[in-house]
Image (tube, grey):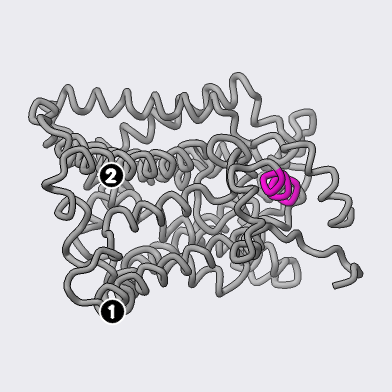
Amino acid sequence: MSAQVVQCSAAAVRPRSVVHAAVATTGLLAYLGAASILYARQPFGIDAAQGAMFLIGVTAMAIFIVDLGWLKAHRRPSTGLDFAYDDPSWSRTGVKLLGLSVTLALVAFAYWAFPVYQEKLYEGYWDLLEAIVPPWLVLAVPYFHFVDRKMRSPRDGYWHVGQAALLNFREVDREVLVQHVLGWIIKAFFLALMVAFMCSDVKWLYLLSLDRLDSFSDWYDFAYRLVYFIDVGIACVGYIMAFRLTDTQIRSSEPTLFGWIIAVMCYPPFWDVVYGQYLRYDTGHPWGAWLATHHVLYVAWGTGILVLLAIYVWATIIFAARFSNLTHRGIITNGPYRWMRHPAYLSKNLSWWMISVPFMPRGNVGGTIAACSMLLGVNVIYYLRAKTEERHLSRDTTYVQYALWVDQHGLLRHFRRLPLLRHLAYRPPRAPGAPA
């Protein structure tokens, strides 16, 4: 189908989202309910890692009850499964389990070899792995066998890793193998980071006292931390629950080195260098100090920040169990994505301008210009992230249709017509042989 045909058809129809709003809402309510239980019964004595496991488990269970029980996600063609088909093969399953073992061994070696993972930040992550990996490995045997026998094309990434381990290189599809490796690098890197953040947030929850929230400032601080508590919790669910049987598997990973660099530089430990050495835009005089003596403006400005952060976390919630950086796990077209292509990036970047207010003069014009320039540099990084993600997802015609529809009907459709913003309009990939 040519880009022109796609563009014409996309203007009238928004593709169905891979995640139903009811699934995302159920996941959020389950997460908040589980968090309320942890908050109300702090004397349980469970540590942060156990608290994180409880939150992840309850949320995932609620999501899949709706997604599998009601929407029958496991029967979608995108899973690659056919429940009317049955081709059991323990030898093929054995190769896949070997591939799984090799994959996990390489991940374990990386965790052992890189000094960053010995830091105190990751203690909760090791506790979580110690609790879930042994039973997960046991359950992997029947799971792999069942899924394998229902796959029309059973030679997945695990099979190719297994064949490589057996030195049967003629059987190995390099593209499938590379995608498998990239997917596991993504899971290993981001899951460790998100669980570490989540354990820190659970500790915050244990120490929280809602009775002490007496002012707008207190409520602002609480809401700000709550947003990121929800964000990393839903992200953890997404990184852990990547299964073909639930249609939450990684369909493809970002294939370009530039796309990887521009994404991972936004996270520790790389962000510590990027921000600390090159793009430090913080002036030490944020919005709260600026408006401390102007109560009405203080409340209005703080509320505006929280609205932006609410949009940001909504963009995570709507993924349910499919959230993941650098991957394609189905196209989201509802929630805030109904109104714009990159609501998370836009709202987060705008919130940073409102929080740090680098444009407010501090007696040094040069310093003000420098701070604004640094934050603009951060904005450019996220703009490039958005563009690399679009290029990756545009391999799926559903995303092309969605992006064109948003350009025609989205919230920012009028702004993209301005001369300075025309480059923000979505440009679909050209069909092979089409004129430039």
In the image, residue 265 lies at what x, y percent?
Answer: 41, 69
Residue drawn where x is 70% and y is 67% of the image:
175
- When the figure is inspected, residue 155 is found, relative to residue 17, above or below; the finding is below
Residue drawn where x is 10% and y is 30% of the image:
214
- When the figure is inspected, residue 271 is found, relative to residue 291, above or below; the finding is below
Q: Nearer the viewer, residue 295 or 381?
A: 295
SS at mark 1 in the image: helix
Residue drawn where x is 71% and y is 57% of the image:
394
Q: Main secondary structure of the magenta part?
A: helix
Which residue is denoted by mark 2 in the rendering?
301
The amino acid type of the residue labelled 2 equals Trp
Give the residues drawn in magenta, as a range. 400-408
Residue 401 among those drawn in magenta: yes
Q: CA distance from mark 1 to mark 2?
A: 29 Å
Q: Nearer the viewer, residue 254 or 266?
A: 266
Camera-side mark, 1 or 2:
2
Give the left or right position of residue 211, taking residue 201 as reference: left
The amino acid type of the residue labelled 1 equals Gln
* Marked residue nearer the N-terminal end (1 or 2): 1
- State the image quarter where residue 110 is shown: bottom left
Q: What is the residue that sits farthest to the top in this orientation?
A: 70
- Count of numbered circles on the image: 2
Which residue is denoted by mark 1 in the rendering?
277
The C terminus, quarter of image: bottom right
User: Can the viewer see residue 245?
Assistant: no
Q: Nearer the viewer, residue 254 or 174?
A: 254
